[in-house]
Image: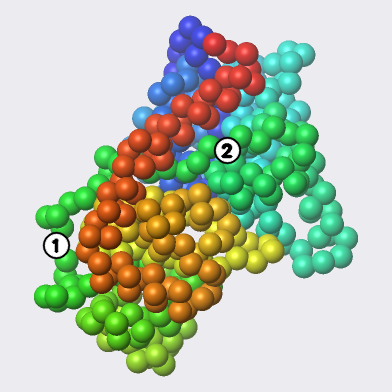
Amino acid sequence: MNERRQGAMRLAMITQDFPPDIGGTQRYALELANRLAASCGDFLLLAPDIPGGSSFDAELDFEVQRVGGSYNLHWYHAYRRLSNLRATRPFDAVLHIQWSTALLTNRLRNGSRPIPNVIIAHGRELLFNPFSGGPLNAAYQALRRSVLSRSAAIVAISDQTATIARRLAAATPVTIVYNGTDPEKMKPDPSVANPFRRPGQRIILSMSRLVYRKGVDLLIRALPAVRARVGDVRLLVAGAGPEEAALHELANETEVRAHVDFVGATPPEEAARYYNMCDVFAMCARESHTDIEGFGLVYLEANACLKPVVGSRVGGVPSAIVDGETGFLVDAEDVGQISDALSRILLDDELARRMGEAGRRRVVEYYNWDRIHDEVLALLKSKTSLP
């Protein structure tokens, strides 16, 4: 446990999603925790007790306590742990990476003073409901509204997420703190070997979980038209998930299987290598009334590696891509627009260069983890009256 420095915050952070699990929210939690731990006088992160957790935590420079073994009950185990620690570690605030972990922590107090709870909203969790209808559906929605309304503040990672959060909890202040990445880790590297590229070939990369919402099938459907216009183009699909078999079948049906490489799940430390192998990055996600793409860290990561990007105009993606400047936005599920956007970039090297450079400049100047840390820490301090 860190010794408290003069005026430094004592912060507990609770997250249901954390490495060694892989995903955008897991990466967000890790990057933010790394920086907040260095700024706080006492910092504790509570994460689920999952396989590989202890060995992962041993490499970190801050304290992680693993509690419980169930994601669905992590909120309860975390509350009990903080409740037991109150006497020896009176935290100034509790930061939640998901709203559900704040179910009970609003009860925690330092003496007579309630401990402020700040919730970071990513998007999908504000719409998701495990119940398809009836009284349980309504009860779940009411519970979510109650938890959000009782928080001291909500941090939204995109404009769309902020809109949803304000609709759910009109009286709770919502601050937009846009997502970011690390331009020192995600950067251009011309020395990267590319085992997939033939001479003269262009490569489209998509990196995501292989689920229907991510729209990898749309890229496969667009590939024949792109190849007809551009020539020798290959699609590199990095990721794993339940849609993988269906995507293989679709590639066969559209007669592009020989031009699609499925490389499997990509560890975070390998992501920059794959970005550097491509000419353009694309992820054309779908959305529904219960599920959205909250932001899309992958667009910033690709941009940071000097790559232009293509994404759909859904959820928080317009906060990640400046249309016509760092990449192109297309209408969701419009295969024609997707093939047009990809072809324009692949046929115009100067356009691709300008977009990649604008994207990296945007990451270096603003869309990075250090800026996110600064804004989140300032908000936390404002809720605790710390200088």
Image height check: is 308 above or below 14? below
Horizontal and vertical percent position of residue 328:
41, 62
Q: Please tell me in which quadrant of the rendered image residue 355 appears.
A: bottom left
| Structural crowding at the residue carrying mark 1, measured as other residues with C-alpha within 10 Å and reported as few (<14), some (14–19) or many (≥20) | few
What distance separates the C-alpha of mark 1 from that of mark 2?
39 Å
The residue under the point 40% across, 57% down is 324
Q: Residue 148 — which label? A: none
Q: Please tell me in which quadrant of the rendered image residue 81 appears.
A: top right
Q: Name the residue under label 1.
A: 193
Q: Mark 2 points at which residue?
A: 176
Marked residue nearer the N-terminal end (1 or 2): 2
**Secondary structure of residue under mark 1:** loop
| Of residues 321 and 302, the one drawn nearer to the viewer in this rendering | 321
| Structural crowding at the residue carrying mark 2, measured as other residues with C-alpha within 10 Å and reported as few (<14), some (14–19) or many (≥20) | some
The residue under the point 31% across, 42% down is 361
At label 2, the amino acid type is Ile
Image height check: is 86 above or below 196? above
Horizontal and vertical percent position of residue 169:
76, 41
Residue 177 visible (yes or no): yes
197 relative position to 9: left or right: left
259 relative position to 282: left or right: left
